[in-house]
Amino acid sequence: MSTQHFFVQDVMRSEDEPRRLQKLHEENARTRWFNIRHHNSQPYLHVYDRFGPLCDLPAGDGADASSTFPTIVSFIGKSGVGKSTLVRAMLLLGSIDAQQVDTEDVSVLASNQSRMAAFKNISSAQGPLPVTRSGHVDHLADPTTFGVHLYKDEKGLCGPPSSPAGYTLFADCEGFFTGAAQTNAERLTSGRGITPAEDDAMEANLLYKAPVTANMSTQDGQGRAESYYARFLYSISDVVVFVTNEDQNITSLLMSALEWAATAVLHSVNYPSRKTLIIVRNGAIGQRQQIIDTESLERLYLDRQTVNLWKRSGILEPFVNDYNSRQDKYSKHVYDNRDLYDVLFDRTLCFCIPRVDDVEEYRDETVFTQYLGLRTLIDEASRRAVSMRSQVWMRYDVASFSQMLFAAFEHFRTSDKPFNFNQVVRINRPHPRSFLNHIANFLRLALNTTYFREIRAMIPDIIALNLVVWAMRTLHQAEDENDVSLAEQCHSAIKEFEAKYQQCGYKFANSDHCINGPVIAHQQLHLSPNNKQAYGPFVLRQVLDPNLVGVIRGKFLEHYNTVVIEDRTGRRSMGKPLPDKIKRVREAVMQKYWSHWLDMTSNTTCLACLQAVPENVLHCGHGYCVRCVRELGKPSESFESAWTFEVCSLCGRRTGDNYSHLIRGTPCCSGVRILTLDGGGIRGIIELALIQEIENKLGLGIPFRDYFDLVVGTSTGGIVGLAISMGDKDANTQTSLLTKAFKSFASTTFLHPRAGRLLDRLGLGHFVTSVVMSVGLYQALFDSNPLQAGLERFFGAHTSLFSSARTRHHQCSTRVAVVTTKEFGKRAHLITSYNRATLGSSNDFDREDDEGRGMKIWEAGLATSAAPFYLPPFKKTETGSVYFDGALHMNCPAPGAVEEVKKIWPENTPSLDVLVSLGTGIQESEVKIPKAIRIGGFAEICKTFHRQLDSENQWENFRSSGATDGIRDRLHRLNPPIDEDLQKVTLYQWQKMNQLEAMVQRQMKEPAWRARLGHVTSALLASLFYFEPDAEAPLSPTTPTPTPTSTQHGIEATEIQGTIRTRLRHDSGELSRLLHRVTGLFWTKLSASSRGISISPSVQHEPWTEILAFTTTKEQVLQFGCPFRVPVHFTEPSGTKSLLVAVRFRDSAAPVPISGFPASLQSLYAKARAWD
């Protein structure tokens, strides 16, 4: 027996034994991707956790998911035509080296004595394969597959060496025209005597279930399901394989296939026809011949239709009429069937798979050859699709494809409007990472204003000015006008603008501009706002000066000379110009265009330098990067490391009538202080009670947020974090006010379940609500509207998280982030009040350039607290993004917060001063979600959510293995046990909040807890002190260069001088209270030099040296209100030890390290130089 025989028999075999058939369907249930079911005549979309795990790369294989590009091949057709058989064959061909198979016997298979064993090994590598049609007599009239199943081909797509890695996903769709018939998959996998809700709960990989609310034209249940499959699969597929076995009915079948495609095309835009349609004649009956060749089949199926197919279709005729009406040229109209195929598909091919019994000679070999030919055809079409997409924006990797799939699921479920791929993928969304990216983004903003003629002079002037700023910052000398590096930057930026941001200037007959752009997404298809279409090349809407780079070069030399030529002598300065002069020149040039800046703001580009992301936003909406704040702001008279703005350096608008805009920065040599807050529903009251206890012990009377540089919260901890960091709508952060508001949020949100007053009257409460949810009336136990209303009232309905100063005239200096998840809870995501140093480098963070699409504070609170089953997911209307509770990923956000520090400050990352992690109470066991309520389509998410609620275990894992030795002594965890009489406090039992609050207040009086609070407060108070290197004096008298060491008499001498300062306001009550608790400052040397070294008692250090200037400075501060600045001069001859500067409090047994210490002199040098 030949290998081809084994292969064909294995592919086409029909199982007839009921038990084995049931087992096959149960195993195949793991491959479900999505389906439509009906509950009480309402169609529901069920989505399963299939795509993500299927595309996950094996650990250690060295591949990068970001450079892997999947294609989808969908098999569709009438029930019973062998779609699953073909998918099975294609998968098996991908698992074996089919090209090496010949007609001779294969000794390996013969020696195994079992072809089943050989193919079982192949199948096991693939995972579950499609179940082919049942051979049981009772199942002959029943369809096989239910919904859409997804399979991954083990054979990668082979292309040119430079092409990206790719692979194929096969989607096996249930048969059409089955009516209400139950499929074998449903019959054999559904439990007997159980409800649909219980059936949902048993589906371990069910991600979610939601009603299909789109008004599909087809009224019957199965037709609505088929319409959804059509719209979705056509939109996301690269190759569509239409399978048929009825030659006599081919006209009506092909008409159905075209209707299927037209239904989808009507509901998607900006994704021109790039799909290949392969019509497969699979085992048709009645043709006693070897095979029908491709050309003959195309004539039979495509060319011999005597009537125009759309004339007989109620779907196709309106589609063709609408399509023709949207074409500017008659030559592009649909006149015959071939035209219609060309509109719906890029290529249309035909292929024949004969019935084995109809082949007269070499049956198995012939059929195998045809299978292989079909596989080759699919591979070629897939490679063609990847090649086409690689030239435009549609070359999506796994992560971006996953986001697009999620958006498509939701869009087709809820909307009848077209699915706009440009809006979903958003290729022209700015994610600037480099100087040239920022220049390109500036061009986008400038050329999208209404002042195009006036803006022509502004563009080269501003770009040239910021090239000068770049030269000053990097000490780059412009020796001649042909400076190559600067010119290349400009040329590259212009090319990026043209490719990514330039809009099409084509005008339709009614003067509407084409909205299909940019050029990389245009594909010679013009689209009007009312969906008219015309074909033609991309037309530049804004034509830039061809000599723009030359004009920029001239302006650069002009501004450069203005900066470097001395005003008194008229000669070029030999040193770096004074900062004040650079500032004057910059502001003079920028404010020439003040009126243009008014409508030009960006959340991703600092428009004052075009070199970094903005971090601080003024009331006018203009954001400044950290360096521009230092260069353009005025040093604050009230705080150290702080600056003020009286007016905006860009638009000239005042920041306020009676005050300046204060921006507090992070000192260059300080460490970082982190607060993290766990999730836990109403038990968040425990965190607020702990904060109140810590504040009472600190006793300085400053906002709690001022003790921290970064606050990260999850779920209810996210809401608490937002409240203490951002304050209410009046920027009030008093803990007592926040506690009152939190109790209000919780009680109004969880007072009534969504099933309403009827359940309260019945006295059955949440249990009956779960039953009501099981029949699909509700998807969450509680309505989120009360929580939303409370958050809006508290934070303000329009207050931005990133740029709160727009509405509050106040800048929050403490960075805050909340943890949430996207894509059904599968991908972690951070929503933040700050920018990372580099945007667009990861999928867990994004920033909208347009403030109108940015997150409001209340929206961030809803997004992080959308607990599965308890509250519905939060959908951001402007972007379409859907968010789930952050606890699905990280209920204890401490590990993520430590990693986030490296992303905020990737260069010279600050050491950790202190991390305070607040929990929501330890219970003997977390409340498990009852089986009766594991419904609503969130079964898997609910299980993950409740599994993640054990944040104490997450903390212990982090402390024992995730945290390095250098930071372990800086970690502080406060998570009190919940009293026995309060055990098993659920997330929604708001009536217990007062008891939990009183419990914390009582426990914190116990000696053990008082000691732990003492350690926390000592660390926080000590971190208010930091070292600031002198700006004027040289860092080392023997070191004229940035190198921190030099040799003198054979000894390597290293020294640094500066002052010890505090983060508190000068001449303030809080500063006086702090200093009254301090007895002295000290320093010593540790035996190791690594940054972040442990400071446990076991570490050897030299005797403490008292800093004697502290006493004098303290007296001057308390008596005369002088700034607190203690001069210090450190030396470390060996270069191998670290310095430790510490403060001693009256109530502490030993000195406590100040911010940023211990640290090596080398690291202090690096941070000081980076600051210059």
Image (tube, helix red, strand yellow):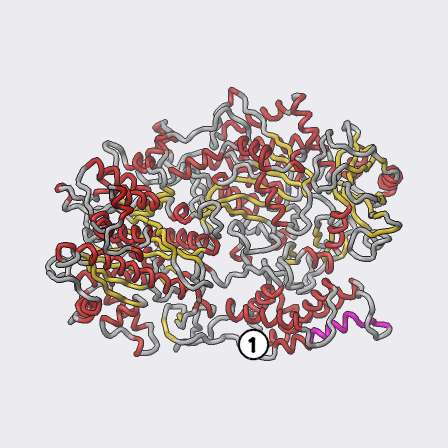
Question: In terms of secondary structure, what is the magenta stretch mainly?
Answer: helix
**Looking at the figure, which quarter contains the C terminus?**
bottom right
- The question of residue 165 being in magenta is answered with no
Query: As displayed, is residue 863 above or below residue 921?
Result: below
Residue at the (70%, 63%) spot, across then down:
649
Residue 560 located within the stretch drawn in magenta: yes
- At a point 20% along the width and 51% down the height, the residue shown is 79
- Which range is magenta? 555-568
Q: Residue at x 64, y 42 (%)?
A: 732
Judging by the rendered image, the residue that carries numbered circle 1 is: 544
x and y percent of residue 1164 in the render?
A: 76, 48
Residue 1051's place in the image compared with 308, above or below, is above
Res. 779 visible in picture: yes
Residue 895, how many percent across, how many down? 58, 39
Q: Amino acid at mark 1?
A: Leu
Look at the numbered disc 1 and give the secondary structure of its residue.
loop
| Location of residue 650 in the rendering, given as x and y in whole percent from the top left corner | 67, 64
**Foreground residue, 716 or 480?**
480
User: Can you say whether 1104 is above or below 875 in the image?
Assistant: above
Residue 760 visible somewhere in the drawing = no
